[in-house]
Image (cartoon, rainbow, N blue to C red):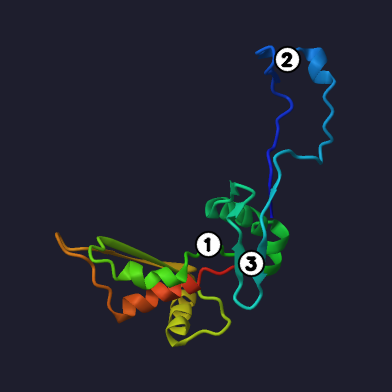
Amino acid sequence: MARFTEIDTSLPWFDTQKFVIAEEAEVRRITIPPALKPNYTGFDFTFSLKDHVFIFEQYSLGKTLSPTQVLKFLRVLFSSRRLVREFGDVMTDVVSDAEQLPALLDMHQLRWLKIVVQRPNPDDLGELEKEIEERLRRQKARSMEIAYAAERDEGIRPNKETRQLAEIAMSCCRFR
């Protein structure tokens, strides 16, 4: 995966030595082939075919690549007409570190909790995942959202079902 700077060469150029807008004659001498892009930083990634998970490096050479940037890139990539025609809509989402979920759910003052469950990946579904898949399929829905708000001066105490839904929500954020 690559990150680089796109330069709009139609905008004025600035001469940092003279501290003025560059003269037309100076700008005409600039020749950068269109395929070359400055400020390149490469980011390693892998895609698990079994789990449909795209894992990427967030830091490289002192530069960062945010999950939001990767999500936008993948959504544009997977929205191509050819892919949609062949495979249907491709759902993409960001999956947080699943190991952090128990700590999140056990927070003492958990004030609100929103769980968004996307239609599960049909590979290796457990019983609850099958139930959710069927519920969404019957209603021609691709996702469901459940939100909890704490009582005044209390923290939410997620029960077993809520914890399972949260785990499914994290595991269902797959590329389909």
Residue 140 image position (x, y, % from top left): 49, 71
Residue 93: image tag? 1
Dot 3, crowdedness within 10 Å: few (<14), some or many (≥20)? few
Q: Earlier in the sequence, mark 2 or mark 1?
A: 2
**Which of the two labelled residues, at mark 3 and mark 1, occupies the earlier sequence position?**
3
Residue at the location (44% across, 78% down)? 132
According to the image, label 2 marks what residue?
Answer: 22
Q: Considering the image in quadrants, where does the N terminus appear?
A: bottom right
Q: Nearer the viewer, mark 2 or mark 3?
A: 2
> What residue appears at the point 64 percent right and 57 percent down from the top-left corner?
79
Look at label 1 and name its amino acid. Answer: Asp
Q: Which residue is mark 3?
A: 88
First-in-chain label (2 vs 3): 2
Q: Are marks 2 and 3 in contact (CB under 8 Å)?
A: no
Residue 5, located in which quarter of the rendered image?
Answer: top right
Q: Comparing marks 3 and 1, which lies closer to the viewer?
A: 1
Q: Which type of secondary structure does the marked residue at label 1 adopt?
A: loop
- Residue at screen point 44% across, 87% down: 127
What x and y, as percent, mark residue 15?
A: 70, 17
From the top left corner, tell me how far across and down residue 134 is, in percent: 47, 81
Q: CA distance from mark 3 to mark 1?
A: 16 Å
**Cβ atoms under marks 3 and 1 closer than 8 Å:** no
Amino acid type at image mark 3: Gly
Furthest residue in direction left, as rendered: 153
Q: Is residue 122 left or right of residue 96?
A: right
In the image, 121: left or right of 34? left
Q: Nearer the viewer, residue 8 or 30?
A: 30
